[in-house]
Image (cartoon, rainbow, N blue to C red):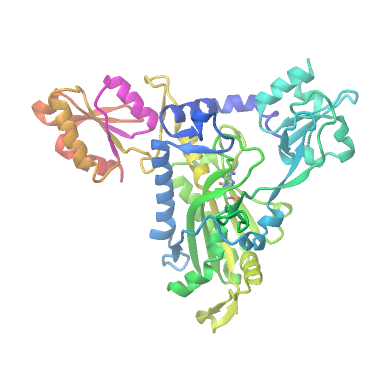
Amino acid sequence: MQAAENTDQNQEENPIDMKDIVSLCKRRGFIFPASDIYGGINGFWDYGPLGTELKNNLRDYWWKSMVTTPPVGPDGHPVQIVGLDSAIIQNPEVWVASGHVGGFSDPMVDCKETQKRYRADHLIALKPKEESSPWIAIIEDDEEFLEKRLKKTAKGKSITDFDQVNLTDVDLADYGKILAPDAKEVGTLTEPKEFNLLFETGVGASEQDKTTAYLRGETAQGIFINYKNVLDSSRVKMPFGIAQVGKAFRNEVNPRNYIFRSREFEQMEMEWFCHPDEAPKWFEFWKEERQKFWQKIGLNSDNILMRDHAADELVFYSKGTCDIEYKYPFTAPDFGELEGIANRGDYDLTQHQEHSKTKLEYLDPERNNEKYLPHVIEPAAGLTRGVLALICEAYTPDPNRPSGVYLNFDPKMAPKKAAILPLMAKGEHPVIAEKLYMALREEFAVDLDIKQNIGKRYARQDEIGTPYCFTIDDETISDGTVTARERNTMAQERIPLDKVSEYLREKLK
Ligand code: GAP
């Protein structure tokens, strides 16, 4: 349990408050609570005009880095990766074979008093050093809750008066002594039970015809079940990859930390199929490539951690897993998962071969027609979690500018690359501005913003992270120049109106 211990350090190291980020994202149209006008729905989010642009930029850059211009492999040639877009609902047997129907679950405890349900592995039991008082269950990483709970249930005591034990490590015989997170009575928590995360739905028009199916819990399975179709229909040869971006659904017990853990989210996954002997080499290759990817789009290396899983953390079939973690404001000074890179062996193809009774072995012409089930390296990233990392990284408080904050996006990711701002809303200025806008918009995502005072318009562009603003004023009419303003430094310079495209192209290179 780190949240409580790190409270002071958190504040020192990390003055950014998630509340401010959430508020900016709503105010400026990045992210809204889903069903907002109906009071929302826990674990679901809608992406507004700018959030959608940002998400698309990240998605497109990932697609480019995987499918359009994949990296150069150890042999000096680009590796082969093809794209896929599989259905969200598949034959339910897919999820039986993958193990999701039987095992895709979290341990849950219910509170008999409040009827609330918690993920057992997200609860911490505070065990009093003084035996007579009750144990207090708190939710991990929630400092506000911890403070309130201590004030209410253990006046005058601080976190140092307790030992912290993960609830999953507490002996069941001790459950009777625990005060549940929102309860008044002790001993109201049930034993942990497994709770399946797949969302169920019914397929078929009438009630009689309806069969249970599942919304996909990950995009990866769509790739495994199409592995043979891709091999048979394209010219790929081992080793090769299949990439997919799309929605995934998990009925998370405790959706939290904004869009970090939601019930509907997007993934960017690539399954890399290779000869079993080469899997360790490719695992290392993809670890390095994926780390470079996040750095290239603006995440600071100090905020990224490559964390290799210890042997006892690995699922039984995994031959190695490394998480790429990011220092989110709500985890700092610790890190939270952004992407997982796993060496999955032949587990998935074996499962689907057995359940579907379809042969999935590969006959390798480069290896004397050796027949084998390929091993798989899987870099599995969260697209929406990536959006959150980009926003958190970009959020830069700055008391020296009217907005008090700006989003320091890498220009590749910025929803708008430039804004065109006529100083006056009437007369020649907006006419020239619109002409410039029409010329630039063919090449760049640009904004034309005509009304309001110029300070407010700069503030808006700062808050949405637009790297450049071009202002049209009287000097534009007299000498054909515009003011170019740079977001981070707020420095302004005059440049010729007819050189704006060139200027922007150069800056965004
Ligand atoms: N195919 C492997 C797989 O799905 P995962 O670690 O469960 O692995 C991959 O998910 C990535 O998807 C995670 O690293 C995370 O970025 C994202 N992800 C997983 N669950 C999520 C959730 N509930 N909300 C948002 N993103 C999630």
**In the picture, residue 494 is in which quadrant?**
top left
**Stretch in magenta:** 446-469
Which residue is found at the position 78% from the left and 24% from the top? 160
Percent across and percent down for residue 151 are 74, 17
In the depicted structure, whether residue 474 falls above or below residue 294: above
**As rendered, which of 453 and 503 lies closer to the eye?**
453
Query: At x 38% / y 41%, what residue is drawn?
Result: 53
State the image coordinates of residue 469 (x, y, percent, origin top left): 27, 31
Residue that lies at the very extreme toward the left in this rendered image: 478
197 inside magenta stretch:
no
Corner quadrant of residue 459: top left
Residue 380: x %, y % from top left = 55, 53
Q: Position of residue 153 (x, y in %)?
A: 78, 20
Which residue lies at the image location 43% right of the left edge and 46% below the top edge? 58
Image: 414 above or below 215: above
In the displayed structure image, the side of residue 338 where residue 494 appears, left or right: left
Left or right, 84 with respect to 461, comes to: right
